[in-house]
Every structure is written in C-alpha cells, then in structure tokens.
Amino acid sequence: MKYLIYLIAIIILLGLNLGLFGSLQIQSQIPNLLFLLTLFFSLEKKDYDFFFVALVSGLFLDFYSACFFGGFTVSLLVVSLLAHLFVTEILVVDINWKTLSLALLTALVIFNLILWFYGLVIFKLGLNSQYSGIKIFISQFPINFLYNWVMLYPLYLFFTFLRNFLDRMSVRHRGVIR
C-alpha cells in the first residue's frame, strides 16, 4: 500500500514539476521535485524505500526528457545510494537546513556529473547524435541549485507529511490504538 502512495506522490510532484514550474522557468531552469524527494528518502535511515522512489522517479523523468533514455534513472539511483551509504555508514547527521543545503549541493553536483558522463558515453557509442558539453551543465548549475534550494524546505515538509501519514496508517492497520 505504501508503494502505491509513493507512486501517487511521485505523479503529483511530476505534474507540479511539468505543469506549474514549466511555466515558471528561470533562465530555462525548473526545480527537480522528484530529485529532491529522492534525496530526502535516501537521507532517511529507516528503510530502503529510496530505491523504489529513485527508480520510479528516474523512469518518469526519462519518459518526459529529450535525452537518451536511462540517464535520469541511473543518476538518481547512484546519487541516492551514495547519499544513503554516506549517512548510514560514514557520518551521523541530524537533518536541518544546513545539512539539507549541503546534501543538496553535493548530490546535485554528483547528479549533474553522472548525467553529463552518461550523455558522453552514449554519444561516444554512437547511440545519440546530440551531446551537451560540460560547459552547459556548469553554466546552468547556479540557477538550478538556487531554484532547487528554494523548493528544498517546502518539499521537505511534504516529505515529512507523507512519512507521518504512512506511519499513522500502518499503526492503525496493525490495530494499535494510540
């Protein structure tokens, strides 16, 4: 049941991403709400739900992207796995606005590098005739980071609402009365 709720939340965020923010572009950049949701799931230490969220979000982003299929899926899976391993195995952090901002910056850099490298490999293999150079990613990064940073806290509130809703639903499902 929780995966169905995750899927509905992903579809809602994708609709907001393409619909609302598609018309609110700043220098042809929009926030990537699915990337932010995946980042929040990977920073949580509870379970491995971030794999499902990263896979489904990446597939949706690939379907609506003009790039070669698979770039967003691979990038989201790698970034979410690295973030989860870093938080659980290397460093114990408390989630606050400072750590979220640093996690966003680091994850966005890694995400863009993987996306660029994936496009380069696909271009070199002759599977795609178009290639976006690293200069394009570097020039668009500051606006992309700022736009995602503005949406960081509102989406974090949505994420906590979603997790609390699922926790309350699972407690009621087990028959435990609070």
Image: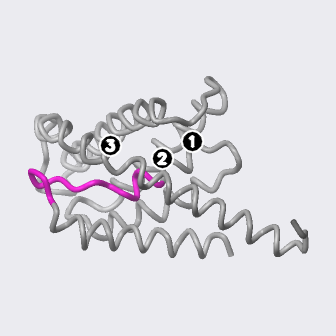
Identify the residue at horizontal 19%, vertical 36% (top origin). Answer: 142
Residue at mark 3: 149
In the rendered view, does 130 fall on the left or right side of 41?
Answer: left
For label 3, the SS is: helix
Place of residue 79 in the rendered image (x, y in percent of width and height, measured from the top left): 45, 41
Which image quarter is the C terminus in? bottom right
Place of residue 28 in the rendered image (x, y in percent of width and height, measured from the top left): 11, 55
Identify the residue at horizontal 82%, vertical 73% (top origin). Answer: 172
Looking at the picture, the colour scheme in use is one colour
Residue furthest top as drawn: 90
Sequence-wise, the earlier of marks 1 and 3 is 1
Query: What is the three-letter code of the residue carrying label 2?
Result: Leu
Q: Residues within 10 Å of mark 3 (few under 14, many from 20)?
A: some
Query: What is the three-letter code of the residue carrying label 1?
Result: Leu
In the rendered view, does 85 fall on the left or right side of 32?
Answer: right
Q: Give residue 87's quadrant in the image.
A: top right
Place of residue 64 in the rendered image (x, y in percent of width and height, measured from the top left): 28, 69
Residue at mark 2: 39
| Magenta stretch secondary structure, dominant | loop
Start-end of magenta stretch: 25-37
Q: Residues within 10 Å of mark 2 (few under 14, many from 20)?
A: many
Callout in the foreground (3, 2)? 3
Residue at mark 1: 43
Place of residue 125 in the rendered image (x, y in percent of width and height, measured from the top left): 23, 48
For the residues bearing labels 1 and 2, Cβ distance under 8 angstroms? yes
